Image (spheres, helix red, strand yellow):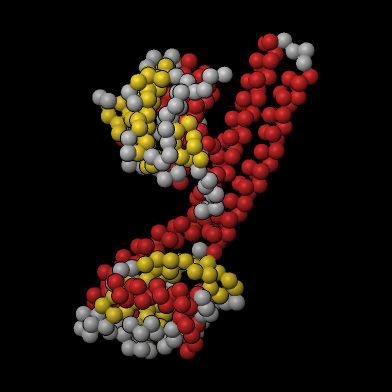
Amino acid sequence: MDKVLNCSERLAHLQRRITELETLSSALDALPETGKRAGFFYQVLQQVDVPIFIQDNAHRFVYANPAYYKMMGLSSEHFLGKTVRDLYNEPLASELWNQEDVILATGKSREYEAEVECQAESRRISIRKSHLLDPKTHYAYLVGVVSDITVQKRMENLREEVDRITRHDLKGQIMSLVNIPRLLRISGNLKEEQLELIQMLEDAGIQMLDMVNTSLNLYRMETGLFNYTPSQVDLVSIVYKAFYFLKNTMEQKHLSLEVKLDSEIVDSGLKFFIIGDDLLCYSIFYNLLKNACEASPSERKILIEMFNAESKLIRIHNDGVIPEEIRETFFDKFVTSGKRYGTGLGTYSAKLMTETMGGTIDFSTSYELGTTIFLRFPNNHSFIESAPSI
């Protein structure tokens, strides 16, 4: 963890250095192709401990400071006057060359990562290149600032692998908890009270399994590995399912739930379909409804309104207020306020999952009107119908 923090601090240090270099650039004269430059600014570049290089408008390297040579394991005679096509193999060489073309053409800085050989070892580096125009000669230059993020990436990959294994092991244990109540029910000779307790145990196990699956899906969405297969999802049944698992929380605060469909109060007998993923929808509405219950003052109403329009609109309202210090970062990861055991993942996951299904999420909050979460989903092949009679 210390290594990750050190890498983060180093990246922040790099950003400060970039700003300093761009401020100093206007005072630099044109650099000769040997990369040597006398004077104060040359000494500054030589002394900084951040790897820096400079290229001319023909993509040739005309300067690198000692920190860059040290990190890359290069010497000036094997570096100056060369281009990325001379130093790297395909397809990396073309990728870097194309990035440089874009910067020279647009004048805008770009930042990207690359896997390169440094001292006979594969390293992951972050490169930020900026466009500089010499005011005297009008020659264009590229200034690159490099950071070695290999350790950071390895730590991130290790953490993700540990999380994946842990979640996998948890799923196996939870499945056992879910199956035991079913086996007990089959055996018979159970009293009504015992059957109720077994049902509660099974429901809790299913909810835990849903949470683990949601955690896995969150990881897959963050890494671009999630396989989204949309289907029709009834949000009314999803809301009442989430309400079932939050019943105790609501009863403790004497909260009530009201669901409206196109301004008419409904129960679980009507359906409101969107195109989405059943598990993602449950996670979204469970988290948002849970947040609403926790934020609402006691003895109030949680209102959920669903509207059929050009897009599917869902509003979740409670009489609480989002603290001012987290309003700007409300949907960011690990943002929480005033919750002893809050993880800060509820609204973050709701946003990520909503956007995965092609929707949007926003909120309004005030002391006068309380808090409303707005969700909008594409209106594709959706309809409302009465539940079939059984």
Total labels: the figure holds 0
Image vertical order of residue 92 relative to residue 389, above or below? below
Q: Quadrant of residue 188?
A: top right
Please tell me which residue is depicted at 72% across the width and 32% down the height of the picture.
176
Task: Please determine whether, in this image, residue 44 is positioned above or below residue 32.
Answer: above
* Image position, residue 235 (x, y; %): 46, 30
* Snapshot quadrant of residue 205: top right
**Res 381 seen here:** yes
Horizontal and vertical percent position of residue 326: 35, 38
Quadrant including the C terminus: top right
- Where residue 296 appears, as percent x and y from the top left, is 38, 23
State the residue in front, 379 or 259: 379
Q: Nearer the viewer, residue 288 or 144?
A: 288
Pick the front one: 346 or 360: 360
Residue 315 on image: x %, y %: 35, 30
- Does residue 321 appear in the picture of this structure? no
Give the camera-side residue of 290 and 39.
290
Q: Residue at x 46, y 40 (%)?
A: 275
Determine which quarter of the picture holds residue 267: top left
**Residue at x 63% of width, y 20% of height:** 200
